Image (cartoon, helix red, strand yellow):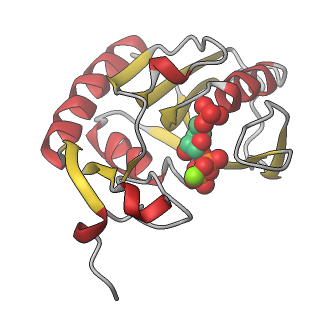
Amino acid sequence: AREIQADLTETLVTEAEIHAKLAELARRIEADYDGKDLLLVGVLKGAVMVMADLARELKSHVNMDWMAVSSYGAGTQSSGVVRILKDLDADLTGRHVLIVEDIIDSGLTLSWLLGNLESRGAESVEICALFRKPEAAKVEVGVKYLGFDIPNQFVVGYGLDYAERYRNLRDVAILAPHVYS
Ligand code: PRP
Ligand code: MN
Ligand code: MG
C-alpha cells in the first residue's frame, strides 16, 4: 500500500494529545453519569476511533450502539437533510444517550441527529465530539463534551477521511493541497 505521510503538510493534533483529552472527557462523563446506565451512540464511520478510545477510558459500564447517516443532495455541500443508512439496534426509551462524534463541521449532521434521537423517548441526549471547526458552523450545536476547536482546514486521520482514505492515520493532520486540487 502507498505511504500516507507524503499526502500531509503538518500534524495538527497528535495521538498522545488526543488520548490525554479523551481521558479528561472520560473523567467528566464518569462523574456526570455516576450511577446511571449510559448508552454511547457512535456515528459511523468517522467516530469509530473516538468511540474505541473513549469507551476504553471509561471505568464504568457502558453500552455501545452505532448509527450510519448520510446527507442528502448532490455536491459537497451538506444540505442538512439526513437519511439513516443504518439505524440503532437499541430502544432509547428512558435511556441516557451520549452521541459520540469525531467532528462538528457545519453542524448539520449532529443537529439533525440530536433532534432525531431526542424524539425517541430518551431520558437524556448529549453530545461528545472530539473536534469542532467553529468557522465552518452553519448551525450551532450544543456539545457538552468537546475535545478541540480546530481551524477550518482539510484535516484527516483518527477516523476523519478524505474520499474514504486516511482514517487509519493515528494523528490528525492537514491534507496537502496536491491531494485534492
Ligand atoms: C463527517 C464527520 C461528521 C460529519 C460532520 O462524516 O464524521 O459525521 O461529517 O459534518 P457536518 O457537521 O458538516 O454535518 P461523513 O458524512 O463524512 O461520513 P463518515 O463519518 O463516514 O466519514
Ligand atoms: Mn461522520
Ligand atoms: Mg467523511
Q: Is residue 90 left or right of residue 19?
A: right
From the top left corner, tell me how far across and down residue 132 is, in percent. Answer: 44, 26
Q: In this view, does 115 lie to the left or right of 8?
A: right
Ligand 1 is located in which of the four quadrants? top right
Question: Which quadrant does the N terminus fall into?
Answer: bottom left
Name the residue rendered at 83%, 25% in the picture.
120
From the top left corner, tell me how far across and down residue 126 is, in percent. Answer: 57, 18
50 or 75, nearer to the observer: 75
70 or 105, nearer to the observer: 105
Q: In which quarter of the image is residue 154?
A: top left
From the top left corner, tell me how far across and down residue 137 is, in percent. Answer: 58, 19
State whether residue 85 appears in this view: yes
Does residue 166 sit above or below 43 in this rendering? below
Name the residue rendered at 34%, 22% in the picture.
30
Name the residue rendered at 46%, 13% in the picture.
144
Does residue 117 sit above or below 17 in this rendering? above
Name the residue rendered at 47%, 67% in the picture.
165
Q: Is residue 153 left or right of residue 14?
A: right
